[in-house]
Amino acid sequence: MDEKSLAVPHPGLSFRAFVTIIACIQAVVAMSIDMMVPALGQIAGALGAEGGNERQWVITAFVLAFGGAQMLYGLAADRFGRRPVLLFSLALYSLCSVVAAFTPSFALLLLARVGQGVGAAGAQVATVSVVRDCYAGRRMARVNSLSFMVFLTAPILAPSLGQGLLMIAPWPSIFLFLAAYGGLMTLWVAWRLPETQHAEDHTGMGWHEFWDAVGMTLTNRMSIGYTLAAMLLLGAWLGFINSAQQVFAEVFQAPKLFPPIFAACSIFMAAAALLNARLVDRWGMRRLAHGAMFGFIAMAALQAGMALSGHDTLLMFTLIQAGMMFGFGLLAGNCGAISMEPMGHVAGTAAAVQGFINMSGAALIGICIGQMFDGTLVPLSVGFFGAGVLAMVIVAAAEGGRLFRSHVVAA
């Protein structure tokens, strides 16, 4: 398909309203992760999670469930449509958020977090499918970048919002806030978002067709290559999220600086997403993604070198993290668009398979990096560098060794 494919009209919504609703739904995931970070110590103390790294499972339980459950929704999104999946999954997310707020034990909290992840997974699969229903090629990458920019207000604001809630109420208030947000999104979808699945794609897909679609997703070189690359980079980022509270508290002795510094770094990621939306029509998805990947690796190498030599400082760590987040902002929308581009006729299943690989693999990478925290930046820094290099190798293999091309190559 030509990378300049025209948009497929989506009924009932302006372009701005479409991007906003998609971004706000996808922000459920970022808020469910980032609002937790300031509260991890309080949650651990209240519910008896005594191990220093045990609290990381509050993040990991959600991410693992979010990644694993996406496979459950692929068949449903292609068979029953995007709107019913969205309504069900957002309602489930809200219910489990209420359960988490009133749980009496750490084990039950983790179970509720799994339920939140299962609900968020359906919302993610359905929104990715909606975007692919309505757009293709560079236009899809532009929509991804703009929605990603709006979505990034969550990591910019969420840690500070979580910290602010903790100043006036105990940790369950965070889960009650998430329940209210999920309920609001459910009502918004019911009121404003129509069904976007094309009539010719609504085929009543059964298990045989589903597994055929899974096979197409896994054997398409662009689909699997860019999905694995995104998984590695997201895994490194989740490693940072898992250990961020400990990094700021134990390495830099500045735990209260985490929310403002994380917000400042996230602004760089949002700026990159906005820049990508402006440049992708001119330069193409691949040129931007490949250039950002090289920049990400260079910044990660600098951070790893400083950590290994013992010369890391809070200022340099902040500047390097901002640079890597800028690269991640360029990579996220483009990698997602390239991986979904050849999958339009099975968008629901493809979104589920790619999401399952991306989030499940990233969660495992993130928990491995987080659990290796030893009071220094070495595990985190080496994890970023290794993930970046391996992602570049996989992308180069998917592209047949020819990077920075502006046109789509059949896979």
Image (cartoon, helix red, strand yellow):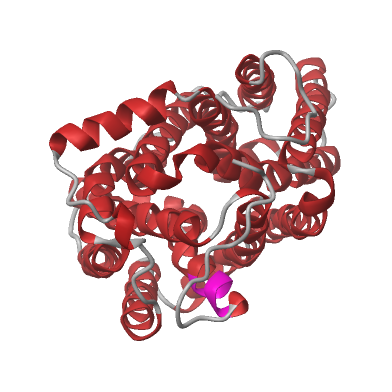
Residue at coordinates 45% horizontally, 58% vertically from top-left?
A: 133
Q: Give the camera-side residue of 194 and 27.
A: 194
Q: Specify start and end residues of the magenta stretch as a single range.
A: 17-21
Whether residue 109 is visible to the viewer of this picture, yes or no, is no
Magenta region, mostly helix, strand or loop?
A: helix
Q: Give the camera-side residue of 122 and 128.
A: 128
Any magenta on residue 295? no
Residue at coordinates 21% horizontally, 53% vertically from top-left?
A: 79
Relative to 344, 65 lies left or right: left
Q: Give the camera-side residue of 45 and 97.
A: 97
Whether residue 171 is visible to the viewer of this picture, yes or no, is yes
Residue at coordinates 47% horizontally, 25% vertically from top-left?
A: 220
Q: Which quarter shows the C terminus?
A: top right
Q: Where 17 falls versus 223 (above or below)?
A: below
Relative to 33, 304 lies left or right: right
* Residue 371, image x, y percentages: 46, 26
Q: Residue furthest bottom?
A: 191
* Residue 305, image x, y percentages: 81, 18
Q: Which quarter shows the N terminus?
A: top right
The quadrant in which residue 361 appears is: top left
Residue at coordinates 36% horizontally, 57% vertically from top-left?
A: 126
* Residue 213, image x, y percentages: 31, 34
Q: Where 335 falls versus 150 (above or below)?
A: above
